[in-house]
Amino acid sequence: MTRTNTKKKDTKFDIAIIGAGPTGIAFACGLSNTNLKVAIIDKQPRESISNPIIDGREIALTHHSVKILKKLSVWDYIPNKTISEIKEARVLDGNSKYFLNFAHQEIRKDCLGFLIPNFIIRKNLYKRLKNLPNISIINKVECLSIDVNDKYASLKLSNGKKIKASLVVAADSRFSKIRSKMGISAYTSDFNKSMIVCRMKHEKPHKNIAYEFFRYKQTQATLPYIKNQSGIVTTANNDLTAELMEMDNKNFNKEIQNSFGNFFGKMKLLGKRYSYPMITTYTKKFVSHRFALIGDAAVGMHPVTAHGFNLNLKGLEILINEIKKAINNKTDIGLESILKNYQNKLHKAAAPIYLATNSIVNLYTSNILPAKLTRQFILRFVNTVKPVKQTFLNILK
């Protein structure tokens, strides 16, 4: 069983993970079949880690991400009734009825991907984690500083204790404090917008189709969930976002229904609305001696293409594989030369998706005439040129 906090003798670990979010816990789960002694450090109480609150976010998982969760022995913990299949994805621009379409038949699968609420994934990651004897959770504690030498990293904690580790892995969000403490900076794009996420019930069926509507004042996405429910994602400038957040439920329902042009018929809010700032980050380097960044701490994606958590899983898979190679070769897992293999592979996977996503967002939220003409052309170009479309489809496999 995982242990809460550490005894006096528990001051030396092979790996210390900063952050008990989904990426940090998934990374720890991937080390279950090693002899590595792992600590997870987080300021949250254990109750919050084990039973995370609903945060409104729905996660669209690719087939490769599901394979990773199966490798981590997490997938079987997730109840089938909480999983919805995405059969198609359609992208529309402005008021045009023409759409770019991605269908499951094009990747020769039963569906394009799977939709699961974020808190469900987090809850079941913890269920897997709690049975792992090589993992210790040090909760209600922050890492104040990290001192790295040739042999180990020394972490000073807010409870006055110190622990040592061969490798420190930061998974503490795109606004990572640990990244800053290690002197690593990140490229940041602030879109001066916010995202509102919520679950809504609607009159017309979604037919398991995800939609991305690039309107001229806001971008709206729908993610098909169970029954006649969808995850609704509205991205708009901060003033409009504040206005939408302050509306009572009745007016909010009417506003969203109208902004969709009655596409789904009558719509009704289920639960709360949640707002998040639209800021993306790309760290200038992912590793240093005895230190690595994973998840949003490495690359914080814009949600418009739903690649964030999928990229996080791919990244931790790469790092786990590099660590296991080092163990097999009887090499120090904290050496920068070992960690640079992870950095190079993640950069190769992440940079094209990150740059393309930010470019899409900038183009499809611009109201100038050349941009409007260009975005219509791009939808048709991707739809009709098979090699280009296949590049997008390969991401979903």
Image (cartoon, helix red, strand yellow):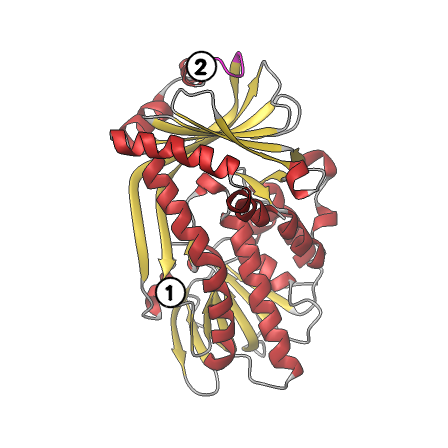
Q: Is residue 125 above or below residue 168?
A: above
What residue is disc 2 on?
261
Q: Which residues are magenta?
A: 261-266
Residue type pointed to by label 2: Gly
Label 2 crowding class (10 Å Cα cut-off): few <14, some 14-19, many 20+? few
Seen from the viewer's position, the closer of residues 274 and 297 is 297
Question: Does residue 264 show up magenta in the picture?
Answer: yes
Query: Dominant secondary structure of the magenta stretch?
Result: loop
Residue under label 1, please give it: 179
Circle 2 sits in a helix, a strand or a loop, which is it? loop
Secondary structure at badge 1 equals: helix
Is 190 on the left or on the right of 22, as rendered?
left
Q: Residue at x 46, y 61 (%)?
A: 141
Q: Is residue 387 above or below residue 198?
A: below
Q: Position of residue 284 (x, y in %)?
A: 35, 65
Alpha carbon distance from label 1 to label 2: 44 Å
The residue positioned farthest toward the front in the image shown: 385
Q: Could you tell me if residue 47 is visible in this image? A: no
